[in-house]
Image (cartoon, rainbow, N blue to C red):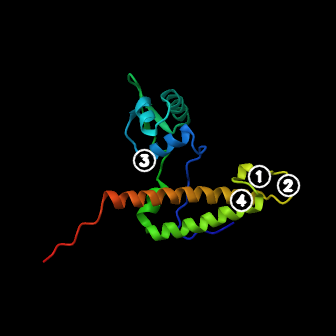
Amino acid sequence: MTRRSKDEVRVVENPFVAGSVAEALYDLLGRTGAPLTAAEFAARVDRDRDAVAETLETFAALGIVTERAGSPPTYARNDAHFPRDAAAVLARERSLADLEARMDELVDRVWRYQQRYDAETPLGVDVSSANVTEADLSDWEAARAELRCHERARRLRLHDAVSNPPEPAERS
C-alpha cells in the first residue's frame, strides 16, 4: 500500500465506461449544478435524447441527480453525491508544470502495466494467469483514474488561462 502525502488529493473519478452516455453526463454534472431537461443535457453532451433521458432516470434512482417535477421534468446534480471535484481542486492548487509532471509519471506507470500484462486496460487481463496479482490490477486502475483526473485538471487550467488571461501591466 502506498502512503499519500498530506498534500495529495484523494481522487474519486468518473466510474462510468469511457465514451458512454453515463460518462459524458457524469462529467457534465460535475461541472454544472443548473437544472436542465433531458433534451438540454442531450444537446450539451451531443448524445441521443432518449439515451440521455434513460440515463438520467437511472441517475435519479442512484441519487446522482434529483428530478424536479415539471413538463418536461428537469434534473439537477445532487451535491451530496459530488462533495468536491478532485480535478477542480488539482487545477486550483497545482501549476500546469506540476500537473504535467505527474501525468508523465502516471502514463509511465500505466504503460508498464500494459507491457507486463499485454493488455490495454486491467479488464483485458486474463486473471487466471499465475503471474496476475489483484494488487497490480487495482494499482493499474487507480493510476488510470488519477491520470484521467490530472488530464481534466490540466484542461481546466488551460481553459482558465485562455478565458482569464492576466491583465497587462500598467505603464507609468
Q: Quadrant where the N terminus lies?
A: bottom right
Query: Which residue is under mark 4?
Result: 114
Type of amino acid under label 2? Ser
Distance of mark 3 from mark 1, alpha carbons? Answer: 33 Å
Residue occupying image coordinates x 40% and y 25%: 69
Where is residue 149 shown, x and y percent of the image? 53, 57
Earlier in the chain: of badge 3 and badge 2, it is 3
User: In the structure shown, which secondary structural element does the residue marked by tag 2 occupy?
Assistant: loop
The C terminus appears in which quarter of the rendering? Answer: bottom left
**Residue beneath label 3, please?**
31
| Circle 1/circle 2 CB separation < 8 Å | yes
Q: Which residue is mark 2?
A: 129
In this rendering, position of residue 124 left or right of residue 164: right
How far apart marks 1 and 2 lie (CA) works out to 9 Å
Residue type at the position of mark 4: Gln
Of callouts 2 and 4, the N-terminal one: 4
- Nearer-the-camera pick, 13 or 97: 97
Q: Position of residue 138 (x, y in %)?
A: 70, 57
Q: In the rendered structure, which disc, 3 or 4, sits on the residue that comes first in sequence?
A: 3
